[in-house]
Amino acid sequence: MARTPLPAPKRPARPVVPLTTDALREAFRQRMLVVAGVLGVEVPSADPAAEVLDAVARHVRERDLVDELWLLHIGITGAFPRTDELEVLRRKLMLSSPATAMLAALEATIELQSRTHSGLRTIEIAEGEVLVDVDFCARYEHNTGIQRVVRKTVPQWQGDDDRAHRLVAWTQDSTGYRALSEVEEDRVLHWDDRRFEKSVDKPWSDAELELEHIVIPWRSTILIAEVPAYHLCNHLAAIAESSGNRMVLIGYDAIPLVSASTLPDLESERFAHYLTVIKHADLVAGISRSAADEFAGFVKTLPSQGLTGPDVIEVSLATEVSESAKAAIDAAADPTEKLVLCVGSHEPRKNQDAVLFAAERLFRQGHEFRMVFVGGGSRTATHRFDRRVAALKREGMNVDSYRGMSDHDLWSLFAQARFTVFVSLHEGFGLPVAESVALGTPVLTSDFGSLDEVAAAGGCLQVDPHDDEAILAGMSTLLLDDTVIERLQGEIAGITQKTWHDYADELWRVTVPSREAVR
């Protein structure tokens, strides 16, 4: 039984620490003592901050190890470095003498220290751990494809001592890892049974930013469970290339690269930043064979840059739906009309224009049915489509387009639908197809790529999504031919769904191949 969510707790009040020289010096000293302890640099704890930095800078300069350089940079600045910032520090140290190493380190990092709210930050080392980066899911209430994957997978590891891990998000200025708040954990771990009411987090003040506590992975494994925001990618690339940590990414798709013409130019530009992380990572776990092939194709180009690139494997997504979805199905009213459902974010590659075109032709042929589109999208992407839907409604066509809908209402529509349509031109996996089949509703879908992989299990009629006539013929068949619907429903009844527990098990095994890997 679902709990009644409590009001979101207020963010704990933080002590007001004046930005004084003494306060900055003490925070800096704490960070440098932590770094010294990790690197095995012996300094008395009572030493002034400058003397601790001098000892650590001499040590790092002499050993010339990039992971120690990365850690030194964080100790000085309280912020994760970008690759270019790390290179500046390395060159300054190499040009210095032992006696001037400390001054070189300060000179190399002064610009970053002057523009970040990090002076009063403290740090801790997460050594030999598994860190799971869930930044977007922690911050936002948005819940479409990638967020569904994260919020179904990560909770499977909770409470398992053999799968100990730490959830992290990025600081408010995107310069370091931090722990999640109670509300953020709730968004990630309890999406289907929330402990707290949905809320919008308020921006942090400069004073709060100064006091953030940074979690630094060291000899650890980092799982990037989402597609990171583009402004985080330079920091992540530096972690992957220089920190000595093992980095694993879930590879959702390479659509902005492979099908750039179907997305705004900005999306392809952002994806290019993401690829800088991919090429220095250790492993990419593609969510389908098609997704894995796309990332493997990119990796094959890396020797021309003198790079090996990550291993790429397939860890196919689960196909089951949650108990809350099944409950919504059970509670749904019997449809009074033939309902055709098309679910997916509104963008050109999802091919909703072709679906609407086929539905309009069926309407003009005199067939009675209800057509429903569900999916968000930018105003630029949806404006023309929504105007077309409104015009058809005025003509008497039973068609609707919803831009915001609760999970419960969406699952109810799946239950009422005679069939769903998802004839996307390019997908990493195609969760709407898997979810429709898992809920017992046949699907009209594409005949290639990851959608062909999902459809192979049964319950789907496949067509060429580039062919308007094929889409029309497929929709007509499923709308009018009860024997085809019954055949597909029979196929669905024989499918054994891959569970999220199964997917989480498989993903963990490749992320952390053995316990020794995280010690």
Image (spheres, rainbow, N blue to C red):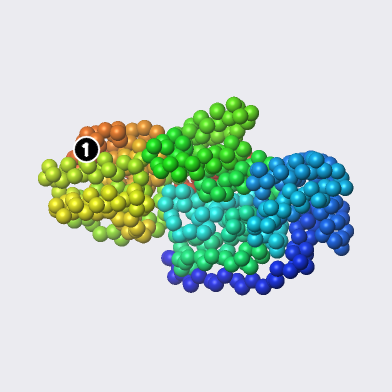
Q: Secondary structure at mark 1?
A: helix
Q: Nearer the viewer, residue 315 or 55?
A: 55
Report crowding for label 1: few under 14, some 14 to 19, many 20 or more residues within 10 A (C-alpha): many
In this rendering, the answer to whether 307 lies above or below 245 is: above
- Tell me the residue at 14%/52% (across/down): 395
Total numbered labels: 1
| Quadrant (top left, top right, bottom left, bottom right) of the N terminus | bottom left
Left or right of 315: which side holds 19?
right
- Tell me the residue at 12%/42% (across/down): 365
Which quadrant of the figure has residue 30?
A: bottom right
Percent position (x, y) of residue 300?
Answer: 55, 28
Q: Nearer the viewer, residue 475 or 396?
A: 396
Percent position (x, y) of residue 298?
Answer: 52, 32
From where the camera sits, is residue 385 visible? Answer: yes
Q: Nearer the viewer, residue 98 or 71?
A: 98
Q: Nearer the viewer, residue 176 or 363?
A: 176
Percent position (x, y) of residue 341?
Answer: 28, 49
User: Mark 1 = which residue?
Assistant: 472
| Residue that protrudes farthest toward the top in the picture | 304
Left or right of 95: which side holds 445?
left
Name the kind of residue labelled 1 in the image. Answer: Leu
From where the camera sits, is residue 438 visible? Answer: no
- Tell me the residue at 50%/55% (across/down): 137
- Tell me the residue at 67%/73% (across/down): 16
Left or right of 272: which side holds 219?
right
Percent position (x, y) of residue 500?
Answer: 48, 48
